[in-house]
Image (spheres, grey):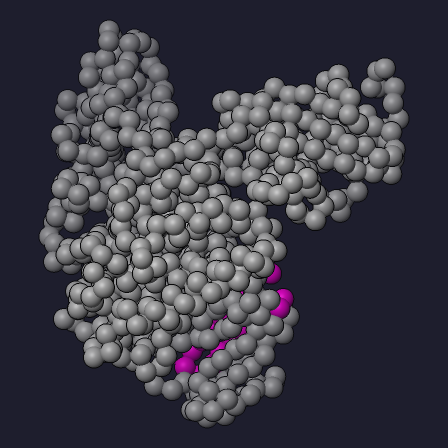
Amino acid sequence: RTLDRQPMPPGRPRDLPKAAWIGYPGDYEIWLGNQVQNRRTERGAFFPPFWKLDNHYVLVDFRKSFDLPGPEYIQFQFQGRHNIKLDGKINLDFGTLYLQPGHHTIEIKVFNESSPPALYAAGTYVISDTSWQVTIEDKEWIDASGKASDKSGTVWQPAEPLPGDDPAHWRLATQPQAASRIERKKNGDLLLDFGKETFGYLHIHGGRGKGKGGYLITYGESREEALAINTSEVQDFVTFSDSGRIDTVLPMSRAFRYVRIMPIGTWVDSASMLYEYSPLAQRGSFRCSDTTINHIWDVAAYTFHLNTREFFLDGIKRDRWIWSGDAYQSYLMNYYLFFDSATVMRTLWALRGKDPVTSHINTIMDYSFYWFMGIYDYYRYTGDTAFIRAVYPRMVTLMSWVMQRRNKDGWLEGMPGDWLFIDWADGLTKKGELSFEQLLFVRSLETMTLCAGLADDPAGAGTYRREAAGLRTRLFTDFWDPRRQAFVYSRVDGQQDGKILRYTNMFSIFFGYLDEAQQDAVRKNVLLNDSIQKITTPYMQFYELEALCAMGEQEHVLKQMKDYWGGMLSLGATTFWEQYDPNEKGVQHYAMYGRPFGKSLCHAWGASPLYLLGKYYLGVRPLSPGYATYAVTPVLGGLKWMEGEVPTPHGNIKVYCSRTRIQVHAVTGEGTLQFKSKSRPVCKAAIRAVGNNLYELTLQNNNDYTIDYAAID
C-alpha cells in the first residue's frame, strides 16, 4: 500500500510534549565524555586520561505499547542500522509508519558501533520520549511501575532525551571574534592578543606559500607562554603546500589569550578566531557597593562560563577533563548562575561510567564521594526524582565496591591504585585512615539513604542509614581531639597522629556535624588560627570560606575574597586561576607541576564567589527539594548595599538589601525571610519576632515585599 493514500491524522495538539532523541541511559554522556576528554594534547602530542574509560552499548532495543485514538503517521530517524517490529511483525522500513486506531506495540532494535544507538520518532500522539522502554538484549525491561517485569536484578531505567538534531555530531555554539591587538615581526611572525582569556578555533586568513611549508602556532594564557616556543603547554603545527591564498580554521579548539603564529616557508595575512561557548542564559546576578567585589563576580561568571562546555571541565587549557572534585563545585556554582540541569546530569553520568566498578572515579577516593554528594545537591536544588531513580543502580554498585574496601575498623585507607588527593598542598601524608576521607564517606552514605528512599529501596535505605549513623558517631570517638577541640588529620594503627589541618574541620561545619560549642572551638582553634597550615588553592578556599560564612563570618570572608581573588585581578587576571600564592612574583605565577607554564589560568574551581555571594550574602537556599520551601537570609557582611537574583526551578528570587531596607521578589513555593534588626521592622505583611533581635516573614507565591529595618553592626 502507498502511504500517501492513507487519511492524515488531525494536527498535533499544542499542549503535547515534543519528540527528542532517546538512547540507553548514560550511554550518550559516556560516549560524548570520551570524545571530549580525548581532545587533550600536550605540545602537540595526544594525551588521553589515565583512568578507565567505558563505552556505549552497541545494540539497544526500544519498545513502546500504546492506544491510539485515531489514525497516526510516525516518522523515524535513527543513529545506526535498525529493525522495526509492529505488533510483533517485522515491518518494511519506509522511515514512516502508518497506524490505525487501537492498541499497538512498536519494538525497534538499533545497532551502532561508532556512536550510541539512538531513536527519534515524531507522530501526532506517538513520539520518542522517556516513556519508551529500553534493553540491551539481556531481556530486562521496565514496566509501568518502574520495576523489573520478568526477573530480579538490575533495573534498567527509561531512555532519556538527547540533545540536538543529530546527537552524534552535536557541537557547541560559535561566533567570530577578532583579536584586540596584532603585532607583526619583521620575519612575518604574528602575535595576537585577544584582550582576555578565551576559547575556540584559530582562523588563519590569507595563508599562502610555495612548496611545502606550514605554521608553528604557540598558544598562551600569558604573553610569556605564547612566546616560549620550547615550554608553552599547547602548540599546533599546520602543514601548507598550496601557492594560492587560503583561509584555514584549525580543527581543534584551544584556550588562550595570546597566540603566536610562526610561518615556515609561508605567509599569513592575519588571523582571528571562532569563539566556542555553551549558549546558556545567565540567570543569576550580583551587584553591591564594593566595586572590587563586583569585578570579582563578573570575572568569576566569565571563568565559569568558559569551563561550562559539553560537561563541567576543570580548566580549558591543559586537562580539559571531567574531574569529579572540580565538577562538584561547578554544580554548586551553576545553581547560582545558570541553573542548568542538563550539564549537571551529563557530567554525573559521564563520571560514573559503567559496571563493573574497578576503581574510584578519576582513580581518586575523595572524588568518588564528591560524585555521591553531587547527586544529593542536585536533588536538593532541582527536586528531580526521575534522575535519582535512573542513576540509583549505579550508585548502589559504586557504594558496594567502596564498602568492600574497608579495613577491620570499618574505615577506608588508601589501597593499590587509589589516589588520595584532598588538595594541592605541601606535607599531606596519605598514610593510615585520613579523617577527611572518612567524613566524605559518611556524607556519601547519608546521600545513599536519601536516594534509596526515592528509588523505592527501603531495605537499602535502612542499611545505609545504620552505617551512616554508626560511622558519624565514630568520627568523634576516633578522630576528635577533646583537648584541642578539633578533628585530627589522620589515624595510624589506631592512634591519632595529632596533626590538625583545616580540611575535616571546615567540612564538618557546613555538613552540620558540630554542635554550637564545637563550631566555636573550630572557628577559634583552626579556621581563624594562623598557625594552622594555610590553604593556597581556590579549590579549598571554596570550602574554608563556606564554613566561615555558615558561622556568620561574612565580614571576614569579604576581606578574604578581596585579598585572594582581588590579588589575582591586581596582577591582570581576566579569569581566575588553578592556584594563587601572593608570595610568588612575575612568571612564578604561571608555573606548576614542575613546568614553567603548567598552571591553568582559567580554572572552574576559581569561580567560587558565585556560590558564596548567592548563598551566604543574598542568603538564598532551598530548604526542601526543588525550592518547594526556601530561605532568604541576607547578610551584608560589611557591604553598604547589595542586590541580585538567584535562579530556581520556578523563576528567579530577587533580593535587595541595604542597612535600612530589604526587598524580596518571591517565587512559587513558600519562603522564609529571616533578618536581624535593632528595632521593630515595618512591612505591610506580618512579621514575626523570633527573639534576640531576629525577625521572620513568610514569602508567598510571586509576591513582592519591602521591609524597612535597622541593621545591627
For the point 69% across and 41% down, which residue is it? 149
Q: Where the C terminus falls, by quadrant?
A: bottom left
Establish if 499 lies above or below 693: above
For the point 53% across and 83% down, which residue is it? 696
Establish if 30 lies above or below 334: above
Outermost residue toward the top in this view: 211
Outermost residue toward the front in this view: 408
The magenta region covers 649-669
Seen from the viewer's position, the closer of residues 13 and 529 is: 529
Is residue 287 among what the camera can see? no
The magenta stretch spans residue 657? yes
Q: Is 89 placed left or right of 484 in the picture?
A: right
Seen from the viewer's position, the closer of residues 561 and 496 is: 496
Residue 260 on image: x %, y %: 22, 30
Is residue 251 among what the camera can see? yes
For the point 43% across and 68% down, which residue is it? 469
Residue 561 on image: x %, y %: 28, 65
Q: Is 651 placed left or right of 472 in the picture?
A: right
Residue 407 on image: x %, y %: 31, 55
The magenta stretch spans residue 271? no
Q: Where the N terminus falls, by quadrant?
A: top right
